[in-house]
Structure formats: structure tokens, C-alpha cells
Image (cartoon, grey):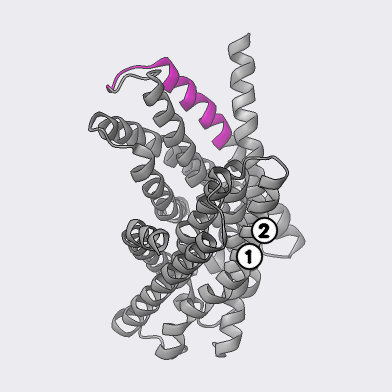
């Protein structure tokens, strides 16, 4: 009986925390379908999107877990926050540049689609990630701080929710960058 | 700047590798652009499905590592009640998550007038993809965790990024391949 209760509790805990993540993922997918799918250059744009979404987990997600840990162990101060932000922005920029280079190369060698010029394609991931980080990092910091201040464990709450928020932000910033660069 | 240097040193390789793997996923999706345009609901569902498989894979690694450190699981590949219970619990969670993703995905598609094509087939494909990938990752992560633990390494540091990246890579591939097989 106890074992059955424990099993149900385990399933419920994992499932409930996943609901928020799923809802945010679905919102990101919907924005992707409504805003990005209609672009004529979608065949080239879809090359970049999975890479951008991978970056958010490994830079934004890691930023959130480092902030949470620093708050819990009492290591959170202006210096550590600034160094954490700087490293996260540099790592994101490296990913953005790498995605830009790979997309341009693949388009020139294999796809040969002239709808989007190489300079726009090169800068598109970098601009998207830069705008996203400017919006996301303050939200993540404030969220971690508030969760910690109200006596909750930021480790359990901030990272899963921030990866979902980052999914939505990345797709929105990607759309904004496409408009800024005038991509058809 | 020690903190900055430590972050850069420990993260740079993982970030570069995951960016490249993400790009490989993008190249795969780009080659099946027609499927995504014909069945747009897939685009609504894919990010949530990939995130869920990645999240549950992280839970697998986290629970396994804790159980290995606590001695609840022996670092040997053998039949274990703890592993069976974890597999059972997380499989049910995965199935519930797939149902939730489908309900939310179709609900949003309906209200935003996104065309709904082959609805029942897509339900079957998402359920098969979710449960198959979960089972595959479970086996790979159990074997890898035990291997790393026996060599005195912390499986969390190695397997969490690998598990989430594998989920991001394999989810679209399995969904698109199943669509190709069935349609």
C-alpha cells in the first residue's frame, strides 16, 4: 500500500513539473508554426532553429543553475553575477557565430538557396541569441532571487521553467531578427 | 576572474558540441521541409516532445546516480527492483506527458486554425516515438551510469548534457521517420 502511494506521489511530482514545461514548449511550437513557417526561406531557417534551441539549455539553463547554486551557498554577489553573465553571453555568441558559419557553408555547398543572402544568414543566429540573452538573463536572475527569497529551492523550479521561457523567447527573438534583417 | 575562467573552461566544449548536434538536427529537418509544411501540427508538438524526453532523461540520470551513491543499486548490470520501479514510474509519466502534449497541441492548432492532418496517425506516432525513445535512453543511460560510476566518475556531469542533446537530436528524427513509414 505504502509502495503504491509512493509510486503515485513520484509520478505526480514529475508530471506536475512537466506540465509547465510542456505548456511553454507548445507555445514555442505554436509561435514557430504561425510566425516562422510562412517565411519563403523556411527551408534555410529550419537549419538554425534546433541549434538555437539547444543553445538555450546549455547556456541559459546553466546560467540559471549556477545562479541558484550561488544563492544557496551564499556566493551570490555583484562580482560572481557579472562573471556568470559575461561567460554566458560569450558562450552564446560563440554558438551563434558557429551556427552562422555552418548555415552559410551548408547553404552555399548543398542547398544553394538565394532567397537569403550569406551576410544575413551569418548574423541571424548571433543577433537572435544576443537579443534573447539581454531579455532572458535579467528575468532568470530576478526569478532565482525571488524563488530563493520566498524560501523555495531555485534548483527545482528555476531551471525547468527558464528553459521553457527561453524556448518562447528564442523563437520570438528569431522572428524579430528576421524582420530586422529583412529576410523574405 | 577565476569564476569566469572556470565557467568558460568547463562549458566551451559542451556548448560547441551541442551547437553542432543542434545544427545536424536542423539539417535533417530541412531535408524534410515538405513534411513540416504538409503536417504543421508537428512543428507545434516537436519542441515540447523533445523537452519532455530530455527532462525525463535527466530525471533518469539523477535518480540512478543518487541510488548508486546510496548503494540502493549495485554498480553491476543486473535485474534490480529499484530500476524496474523507476522504469515503470517514468514510463507512465512519459505516456501522460505525450497525452498532454497531444491535447495541448491539437487544442492550440484548432484555435489558431493550423491545419490538422492525419490526427489519429500523429497520435500513434507521438506515443510510439515518446515511449520508444524513453526506453532506449533508459537502457543507454543505465549502462553508461554504471560504467562511469565504476570508474569513479560522477555520471551527472557527463550524462545530463549528453541525454538532453540526444533527446533533441533523436526526437525529430524518430517522428519524421515514423511519418515517412506510415504515410
Residue A65 appears in view = yes
Near-viewer residue (A171 or B111): A171
- Viewer-proximal residue, B109 or A21? A21
Image coordinates of residue B163 in percent, x first then y, are 40, 45
Q: Which mark is residue A138?
A: 1
Q: Which residues are magenta?
A: B76-94
Q: Residues within 10 Å of mark 2 (few under 14, many from 20)?
A: few
Q: Residue at x 61, y 85 (%)?
A: A179
Compared across the picture, whether B8 is left or right of A173 comes to left
Q: In the rendering, at what x and y percent does residue B13 appear?
A: 31, 60
The residue depicted at 46 percent of the width and 27 percent of the height is B87
Disc 1 chain ID: A
Q: Which residue is mark 2?
A: A142
Left or right of residue A16, residue A85 in this image: left
When the figure is inspected, residue A180 is found, relative to residue A52, above or below; the finding is: below
Q: Is B84 included in the stretch rendered in magenta? A: yes
- Residue A147's disc is none
* Location of residue A1 by image quarter: top right
Is A47 magenta? The answer is no
Which corner quadrant holds the N terminus of chain B?
Answer: bottom left
Residue at image coords 34%, 56%: B10
Residue B103 appears in the rendering = no
Q: SS class of the residue under badge 2? A: helix
Q: Are marks 2 and 1 in contact (CB under 8 Å)?
A: yes
Amino acid at each position: 500500500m505504502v509502495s503504491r502511494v509512493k509510486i503515485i506521489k513520484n509520478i505526480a511530482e514529475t508530471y506536475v513539473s512537466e506540465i509547465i514545461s510542456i505548456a511553454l514548449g507548445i507555445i514555442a511550437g505554436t509561435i514557430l508554426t504561425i510566425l516562422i513557417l510562412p517565411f519563403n526561406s523556411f527551408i534555410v531557417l529550419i537549419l538554425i532553429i534546433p541549434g538555437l534551441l539547444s543553445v538555450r539549455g546549455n547556456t541559459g539553463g546553466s546560467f540559471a543553475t549556477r545562479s541558484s547554486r550561488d544563492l544557496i551557498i551564499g556566493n551570490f554577489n555583484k562580482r560572481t553575477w557579472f562573471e556568470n553573465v559575461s561567460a554566458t553571453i560569450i558562450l552564446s555568441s560563440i554558438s551563434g557565430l558557429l551556427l552562422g558559419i555552418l548555415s552559410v557553408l551548408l547553404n552555399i555547398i548543398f542547398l544553394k538557396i538565394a532567397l537569403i543572402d550569406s551576410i544575413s544568414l551569418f548574423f541571424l543566429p548571433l543577433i537572435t541569441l544576443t537579443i534573447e540573452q539581454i531579455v532572458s538573463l535579467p528575468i532568470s536572475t530576478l526569478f532565482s532571487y525571488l524563488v530563493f527569497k520566498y524560501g523555495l529551492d531555485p534548483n527545482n523550479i528555476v531551471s525547468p521553467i527558464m528553459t521553457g521561457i527561453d524556448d518562447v523567447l528564442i523563437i520570438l527573438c528569431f522572428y524579430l531578427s528576421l524582420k530586422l534583417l529583412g529576410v523574405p | 576572474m577565476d569564476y569566469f575562467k572556470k565557467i568558460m573552461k568547463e562549458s566551451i566544449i559542451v556548448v560547441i558540441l551541442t551547437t553542432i548536434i543542434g545544427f545536424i538536427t536542423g539539417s535533417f529537418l530541412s531535408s524534410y521541409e515538405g513534411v513540416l509544411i504538409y503536417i504543421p501540427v508537428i512543428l507545434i508538438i516537436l519542441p515540447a516532445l523533445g523537452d519532455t524526453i530530455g527532462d525525463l532523461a535527466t530525471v533518469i540520470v539523477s535518480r540512478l546516480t543518487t541510488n548508486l551513491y546510496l548503494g540502493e543499486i549495485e554498480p553491476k548490470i543486473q535485474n534490480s527492483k529499484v530500476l524496474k520501479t523507476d522504469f515503470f514510474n517514468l514510463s507512465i509519466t512519459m505516456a501522460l506527458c505525450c497525452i498532454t502534449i497531444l491535447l495541448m497541441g491539437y487544442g492550440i492548432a484548432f484555435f489558431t486554425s493550423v491545419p490538422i492532418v492525419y490526427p489519429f496517425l500523429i497520435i500513434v506516432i507521438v506515443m510510439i516515438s515518446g515511449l520508444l525513445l524513453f526506453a532506449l535512453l533508459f537502457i543507454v543511460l543505465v549502462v553508461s551510469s554504471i560504467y562511469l560510476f565504476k570508474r569513479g566518475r560522477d555520471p551527472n556531469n557527463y550524462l545530463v548534457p549528453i541525454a538532453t542533446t540526444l533527446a533533441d537530436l533523436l526526437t525529430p528524427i524518430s517522428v519524421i521517420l515514423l511519418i515517412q513509414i506510415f504515410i
